[in-house]
Image: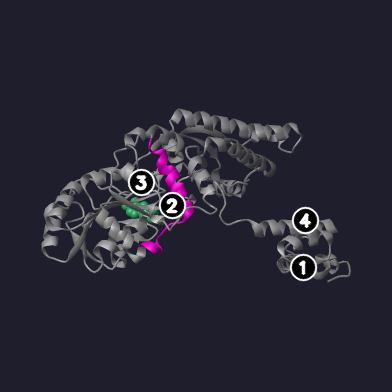
């Protein structure tokens, strides 16, 4: 190290901690935490990973950005430009304004387990149940933490220690490690597979029941895959009849919880919880955050006897949901009292129903705004100015969106997308979009970045255009990968 080495001038942590700008931070974050950030920073500077700041202000700026980095929350809002409406990795259903407001209001004290009429203790399990009854036609219901929990609770409370008859064609994995054979095992029941992969008849179930020891029949909706060809399955109503003859309860694992006619969304037929109730099942299980469009929750609807057994089981307590969830689910369900209003107000339904022309208009406007943002930088004399003609090639084109969330595996919704030709730099483009604040998550396809507006709230179009514009500008500044 020569005498002119600037690293010799690096101050110590204790000296920096006494600076006024540092004291401000230590007051709000604690001295030990700020000292640790400073130690890490100075170590990086000494190792040559960061340039040595040449002023006090330089150190202040370094520390402030290190603090901002350390305080970035891990759970961040993102713009979902993937075109997958129920994107499980991005939190599935975005909630209706009504649900968001109800959840914020429920965050304080509330009548979670309190009866205002009597002043006595009430039951957490009463919330949302009136709505579940109304909307499904079931006599009883109970709400738990998620769909998987609802299925596990149904199996445990009705069939623990006994056999569960399931068709070979329904030995499915839902995703995230939720596999029917394992769930039945975890519920303390024994899996009894009946029929074959492509065809399972009523007689197959009947033989299993005659063999003895069957505690429940489980029918699993094939929500995330399709089989075709020489196939056949036993209708729910037939299983219910068989169950009634033999005294065996029937559980329907339905999955998505669509509460309106799928045709109204331009989607192929999909059973609703009300269909299962009409068929006469003892329990139907469905999710709150798939096609229902509410917060993460699981609902069991069915007969008073079966729901009563589920509610009395100790597992129910372990799966109970939070007051904020109950408030959000209740607000979402109440929108379904008027199906037209539900389609307008529940984002998942609104997004699924958006026609291609509307998405195309929005995509055109977003792209124009993004180009304008680059043009504005040019007029202000930015370095992008002279090279505006080198702007990345982007256009609006027809595309396809997906429903997602393990539902409608074959359905492709006609959409309009912004395609950016990125060639070799697709990864860099996507990374730049993700690095924006708020981050934008897009798809890629053969050298193109594809932004689909279907799952973008129209209120976010401006923000999306700004993000795209800033990545365009970066691209021009660097003359290549953004
Ligand atoms: C999604 C799904 C589940 C699990 O529901 P979660 O709410 O994700 O826990 C269970 N069964 C079926 C058929 C599903 O589609």
Foreground mark, 4 or 3?
3
Q: Is residue 318 above or below residue 401?
A: below
Is residue 183 visible in this depiction of the protein?
A: yes
Q: CA distance from mark 3 to mark 2?
A: 19 Å
Return the residue at label 4: 61
Residue named by callout 1: 46
Looking at the rendered structure, the number of numbered marks drawn on it comes to 4
Count residues near mark 4 (Cα–Cα under 10 Å), then give few for <14, some for 14-19, many for 20+: some
> Which residue occupies the foreground of this view, 251 or 440?
251
Residues drawn in magenta:
316-337
* SS for callout 1: helix
Q: Rounded to the nearest whole Å, what is the CA distance between mark 2 and mark 4?
A: 41 Å
Q: Is residue 360 above or below residue 445?
A: above
Q: Give the mark nearest the N terminus, 3 or 2.
A: 3
Callout 3: 10 Å neighbours few (<14), some, many (20+)? Answer: some
Residue 188 percent location from the top left of the image: 28, 68
């Amino acid at each position: 190290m020569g005498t002119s080495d600037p690293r010799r001038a690096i101050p110590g942590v204790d000296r920096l901690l006494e600076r006024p700008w540092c004291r401000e931070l230590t007051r709000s974050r604690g001295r030990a935490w700020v000292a640790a950030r400073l130690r890490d920073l100075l170590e990086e500077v000494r190792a040559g990973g960061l340039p040595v700041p040449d002023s006090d202000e330089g150190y202040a700026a370094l520390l402030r950005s290190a603090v901002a980095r350390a305080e970035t929350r891990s759970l961040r809002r993102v713009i979902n430009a993937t075109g997958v409406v129920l994107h499980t990795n991005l939190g599935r259903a975005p909630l209706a304004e009504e649900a968001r407001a109800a959840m914020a209001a429920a965050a304080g004290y509330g009548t979670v387990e309190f009866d205002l009429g009597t002043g006595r203790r009430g039951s957490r399990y009463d919330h949302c149940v009136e709505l579940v009854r109304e909307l499904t036609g079931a006599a009883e219901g109970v709400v738990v933490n998620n769909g998987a929990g609802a299925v596990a609770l149904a199996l445990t409370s009705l069939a623990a220690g006994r056999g569960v008859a399931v068709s070979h064609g329904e030995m499915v994995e839902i995703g995230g490690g939720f596999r029917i054979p394992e769930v039945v095992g975890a519920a303390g029941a024994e899996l009894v597979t009946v029929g074959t992969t492509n065809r399972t008849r009523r007689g197959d179930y009947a033989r299993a029941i005659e063999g003895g020891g069957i505690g429940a029949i489980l029918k699993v909706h094939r929500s995330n895959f399709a089989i075709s060809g020489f196939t056949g399955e036993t209708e729910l109503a037939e299983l219910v009849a068989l169950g009634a003859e033999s005294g065996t309860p029937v559980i329907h694992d339905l999955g998505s919880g669509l509460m309106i006619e799928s045709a109204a969304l331009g989607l192929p037929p999909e059973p609703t919880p009300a269909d299962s109730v009409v068929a006469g099942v003892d329990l139907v299980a469905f999710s709150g955050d798939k096609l229902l469009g509410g917060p993460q929750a699981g609902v069991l609807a069915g007969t008073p006897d079966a729901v009563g057994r589920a509610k009395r089981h100790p597992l129910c307590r372990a799966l109970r949901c939070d007051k904020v969830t109950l408030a959000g689910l209740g607000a979402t369900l109440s929108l379904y009292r008027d199906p037209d209003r539900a389609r307008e107000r529940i984002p998942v339904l609104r997004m699924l129903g958006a026609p291609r022309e509307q998405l195309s208009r929005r995509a055109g406007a977003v792209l124009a705004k993004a180009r304008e943002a680059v043009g504005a930088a040019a007029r202000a004399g930015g370095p992008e100015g002279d090279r505006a003609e080198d702007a990345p090639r982007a256009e609006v084109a027809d595309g396809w969106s997906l429903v997602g969330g393990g539902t409608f595996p074959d359905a492709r919704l006609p959409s309009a997308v912004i395609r950016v030709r990125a060639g070799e730099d697709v990864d860099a483009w996507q990374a730049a979009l993700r690095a924006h604040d708020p981050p934008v998550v897009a798809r890629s396809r053969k050298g193109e970045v594809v932004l689909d507006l279907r799952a973008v709230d129209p209120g976010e179009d401006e923000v999306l255009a700004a993000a795209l514009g800033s990545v365009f500008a970066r691209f021009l500044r660097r003359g290549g990968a953004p």
